[in-house]
Image (cartoon, coloured by chain):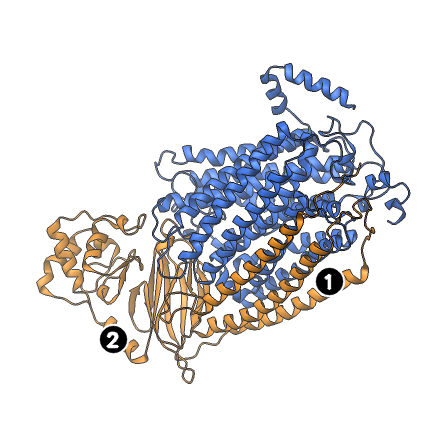
Amino acid sequence: MRIVETMQKADWPAIISRVVGVAVLVAGVLLAAGLCTAAPQDNSVPSIFDSHSTPADSIRHLSHFVLGITGLIFLVVFSLLSYVVVKFRRRVADAEREPAQVYGSTQIELAWTIIPILIVVVLFLATARVIHAIQDAPRPAEAVEVTAIGHQFWWEFRYPKLGIVTANELHVPVSDAAHPTPTFLKLLSADTDHSFWVPQLAGKTDLIPNHPNGTWIDPHETGLFLGQCAQYCGTQHAKMLLRVYVDTPEDFNAWVRGQQEPAKRDEKEAAGRHVFETTACLNCHAITGTNGTGRFGPDLTHLMSRRTIASGAAENSAQNLRLWIQNPDSIKPGSLMPAMKLSDADLDALVRYLETLQ
Amino acid sequence: MSSDVLAIQNAEAASRPWVETLHEWVTTVDHKRLGILYILYALVFLIIGGIEATIIRIQLMRPHNDFVSPQVFNRMFTMHGTTMIFFVAMPILFGFANYLVPLMIGARDMAFPRLNAFGFWLTALGGFLLYFSFVGGSGLYGAGSAPDVGWFAYAPLTSRAFSVGHSADYWTIALLVSGFGSISTAINIIATILCMRCPGMKLSRMPLLAWLNLVMAGMVILAVSPLTAAQIMLSIDRYLGGHFFDTQAGGSATLWMHFFWIFGHPEVYVLIIPAFAFASEIIPVFSRKPIFGYPVMVAATICIGFIGLSVWAHHMFTIGMNSYANSFFVFTTMAIAVPTGIKIFNWLGTMWGGKIQFKTPMIFCIGFLLQFLIAGLTGVMMSVAPFDWQLGNSYFVVAHFHYVIVGGILFCLFGAFYYWFPKITGRLLNETLGKLHFWLFAIGFHLTFDSMHIPGLLGMPRRIYTYEPGRGWEIWNLIETIGVFVQGIATLIFVANLVLSYFNGPKAGNDPWDAWTLEWSVSSPPPVYNFASIPTVASRRPLWDLKHPEDPDSHYE
């Protein structure tokens, strides 16, 4: 009836290699955590542990606390498991005898019920505090207001108080602790669900059609911060990139003044403007001073003030503009921009005109 | 029924034309055959879903890769998720439940054998419909093929404005049909467990596997019904001019989220509870001790069942619920860690003081314990709503739920295969290949899913077909892809082991593991009616009592 176990000795290497394996694993996790926190200075790695804004900072602090507690639990349970696996292996000597049959122990089971309950209560209280601090934060009078509207597959940013409309690249002033100028975003969607996520500035909040949402950032360092859409929104979800420029107050004010100007009207490029006004461009795009008032695509009034096109998918250069207009699929297959199929002359004129839109 | 009768039956079967054998399998209402059908069906889809995962990983191996187009990539992750949840995990677990529950409670079949067959064939039809979309999804529009809306198919992406053609309809109908199949199977499991137990088997003497499947089946009824209702509502939106989820006409996108996740989260427990059930049978046998704290294990499972129904909105921390709603779901989600923790400790308690045999089923269960511990702890991290605002919908969450589903459920399932294969086929699986399978799969699993946490922390969202270089994501993505191939090789070894051992494995006999539950008291494979005479039990371990008449369990319980 009973099977005699004969391969006890052979299990030692397995156990040792398992322990070593897990040690390597834990070391790897620690190393990775180190890499996450030691991101390069230029913010090219949007690590959640490299935060530069009040809500992202509170999340980081909370996450350290949570990682500490879960790490401790892991160590305790993992040590128990390793101990049990090594200590209570069947040995050849008394393979035939069954071990003592233990059915349970009320005290021990109570202990490992009550201790986790206490941990949960502590974790919950710490969490609730941060939820309240971030979600119910008061909006100071100096706050910048922005309406972010998600589109398939780009971002529209409107500054209602400043009369600015732009796309994909959000400009906000840096916030000084003494005189905070946080930015409060109202989040809307024109089509499907999207999510606004710039890990170094704040956690993500979804943009849901027919369901206005809000979030806020309070960056205390200037620079470019990268993010992207974090809710699957269709074919080109991957290239719905997001750039946030945190400017000094002077730079921000200069940017605002520039954006408030009407579009440059350079009569040398009237031919290009004519192409814009007489083709399908104006169905979707707006440029002040022309008859183009479309809102389906990005406002192009100050196109050349942006460093990227196609929602961050390509650098904003004459060559990329040509490519984008003639064959958007070569940059972003599945984007809703149609291929315009212009003649070379028209295309040259149009791109030259677009390049004047500083 | 004696083995002679079986031998005669087999001889008869061998001499019959294959059409008759096929006919027998197609029209069968036998719980064991239906169980095997479920398992084989799921294994086929496991391979298909695995191929889809491989395509996803090859595409993401390096930034700006163009292995597949964005359209194909989006179809792949939608089909991968839908297939793995609805047409691999659920059927395979139903298959084991179907096969094992009657045998373990001393019954001759399920309570409703024909409903059982109906449930299986509905599930089979569902999977067929989903994959028929590759052919029929374009419909008259010539647009779209397989569904590409993601496995949770958020509105309004599924509306006709954004999903032209019929691919979303195939997705809807596939889930609707298989949903009915799941609900009928769940009803059957509940009825069987409540009404068909053999004399002496009080609820408090039931094997844990039966208890856990009872809770699972209850959750299926409560969770799958809203999903099925939502699929009907979506079809009404798409074809009858309804506006449930049509945001352009005042419908609500968040309504779909609530409907989906009130299904989706309990679904996680629907899948993991049967995995717990396997662990709760395998760990005691290979530790040579009874399960530690049986009543607490049952209570913890029921607790998970109830709390599991109240945590769904933790999938929705980023949709802008107010701080009170967020706090509520934080609390319920954290609370579920308590009964789950109790289970882990009780398994450790079972092994404590035992004489652990490192047979393949057991090492898979030990791997499960470690990995499920990590999965649970990353789950605790994400229950912290503010932390989830960063982690949610990033690769961290993808790593987390694959840790649960692969590291937890699939490891237990592999353990279950090695443990019950001898009962189902009469032959043992090869131990050497089994250990090779375990180690290779574990290495591949950790390569892929350990490294997958990191890009999530570095801001990489899920469901992107490509990514920008220079964000610190490249190396991790490359390691993930390498791990997938290691897992693929391990899976091939497993399949080879199944096939080779089926034909050439050593004969198992009735009770190869010296186990204690009723299925090991009958021949392997069990006779058609399971028990020639219905057994009577006096404790939770009837075969222990039989083997140790001097010291039976019934004295202590």
Query: Can see residue A209?
Result: no
Outermost residue on the left side: it is A268
Quadrant position of residue B167: top left
Q: Toward the viewer: B54 or A141?
A: B54
Q: Colour of chain A?
A: orange
Which residue is depicted at the point 21% across and 54% down?
A281
Mark 1 touches mark 2? (CB < 8 Å): no
Please report whichever mark, 1 or 2, sits nearer to the chain's N-terminal start: 1
| Chain letter belonging to callout 2 | A
Q: Is residue B484 above or below residue A262?
A: above
Quadrant position of residue B469: bottom left
Q: Position of residue B291 (x, y in %)?
A: 77, 50
Q: Could you tell whether A97 is left or right of A29 in the image? A: right
| Badge 1: residue crowd in 10 Å (few <14, some 14–19, many ≥20) | some
Quadrant position of residue A177: bottom left
Q: Position of residue A193 (x, y in %)?
A: 43, 55
Q: Amino acid at mark 1?
A: Thr
Q: Position of residue B413 (x, y in %)?
A: 62, 43
Outermost residue on the bottom side: it is A178
Tag 1's secondary structure? helix
| Badge 2: residue crowd in 10 Å (few <14, some 14–19, many ≥20) | few
Q: Which residue is mark 1?
A: A113
Which residue is depicted at the point 70% across and 39% down?
B189
Q: Which residue is mark 2?
A: A257
Q: Toward the viewer: A210 or A35?
A: A35
Q: Could you tell whether B449 is left or right of B525 in the image? A: left
Marks 1 and 2 on same chain: yes
Q: Nearer the viewer, mark 1 or mark 2?
A: 1
Q: Quadrant of the N terminus of chain B?
A: top right
